[in-house]
Image: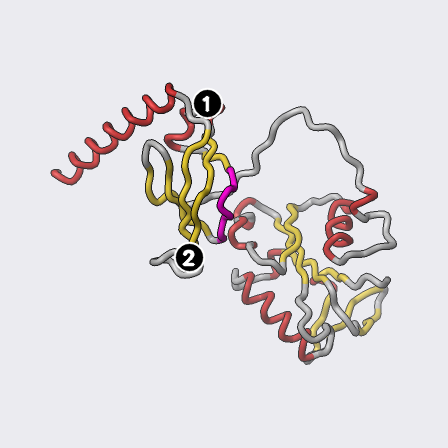
Amino acid sequence: YSVRFVWSSQVLKIGYTFFRKGFGKLERLTQLDLVIVDRRMVVSGDINGFMAALQARAERANAIKKGQRLKFIFLVTNEEQLRPREYESHDIVGLFALPLEQRHISSVAAVALDVVFSVYTFENWGWASTLLNVHVAKPIELESLSEFGAELRHSRPIAPGTVLFLRGGLFENAPNQCLAARFYHCAEHPEHKGEYKCSTIYFGINDAFMKYARRWFRETYAQSKQSDNN
């Protein structure tokens, strides 16, 4: 199996033909599977537009099969470029901060392309036992809040029955500084196109946090009424 993924800085687009620079000569690329992009090359800042343009050019150049979607890996050089919500696309299979570990990016590329004959396949990855429980966090809009649950707005649907942990604000005072919430309903948002309204109930809430939440609601309500009067 031949893997065809190239660094975008090494690719030249001449008309609708793709070439790769290497060893002082140009080598014509007949097919693309995955492109690795330095975020600094997206001058406009429009990542989706950049990918769509490259996808269209690859189709016109017959560099991808009909109906095939190009896969992308993006490289960032600073925290300003590292905004996870900008990279929420099924076509993006990896996001790395420079400098990077060559074996790591090779492994992600091999898995994304379903490469079989490679030392970087999933089966060859080494694993270590974890010593700490780790939560991977993602920003989400909190639309309404009560003593027993909350309504959230998110860019993707969250399946009913899912249990996630809420952090920040009021929830910092819950045990372990987070509160488990079970999702029981999710539907397209009536006011925000392309986003979803998700309803949750708290799971495993204790009396101490319940008392704190009730006091917090009273104080917050009083402050909002005072602000309205002023």
Which three-letter amino acid code belongs to the residue tagged 1? Pro
* Relative image position of residue 113 (x, y in whole percent): 75, 58
- Kindly indicate the quadrant of the structure image that contains residue 73: bottom right
Most distant residue in the top direction: 208
* Relative image position of residue 146 (x, y in whole percent): 32, 35
* Relative image position of residue 57 (x, y in whole percent): 65, 75
Label 1 element class: helix
Which quadrant does the N terminus fall into? bottom right
Q: Nearer the viewer, residue 179 or 119?
A: 179
Q: Which residue is mark 1?
A: 175
Label 2 element class: strand
Residue drawn at x 67%, y 76% is 59
Using a 10 Å C-alpha cutoff, classify the residue at mark 2 as few (fewer than 14 neighbours), some (14 to 19) or many (20 or more): some
Q: In the drawing, does residue 200 fall left or right of residue 215?
A: right
Q: In the drawing, does residue 20 fall left or right of residue 91?
A: right
Q: In the picture shown, does residue 1 fall above or below 79?
A: below
Label at residue 188:
2
Mark 2 or 1: the one toward you: 2
* Relative image position of residue 123 (x, y in whole percent): 81, 44
Residue drawn at x 73%, y 74% is 63
Cα distance between the residues tagged 2 and 1: 32 Å
Using a 10 Å C-alpha cutoff, classify the residue at mark 1 as few (fewer than 14 neighbours), some (14 to 19) or many (20 or more): some
Q: Nearer the viewer, residue 127 or 162?
A: 162
Which stretch appears magenta? Answer: 156-163
Most distant residue in the left direction: 229
Q: Is residue 200 magenta?
A: no
Which three-letter amino acid code belongs to the residue tagged 2? Glu
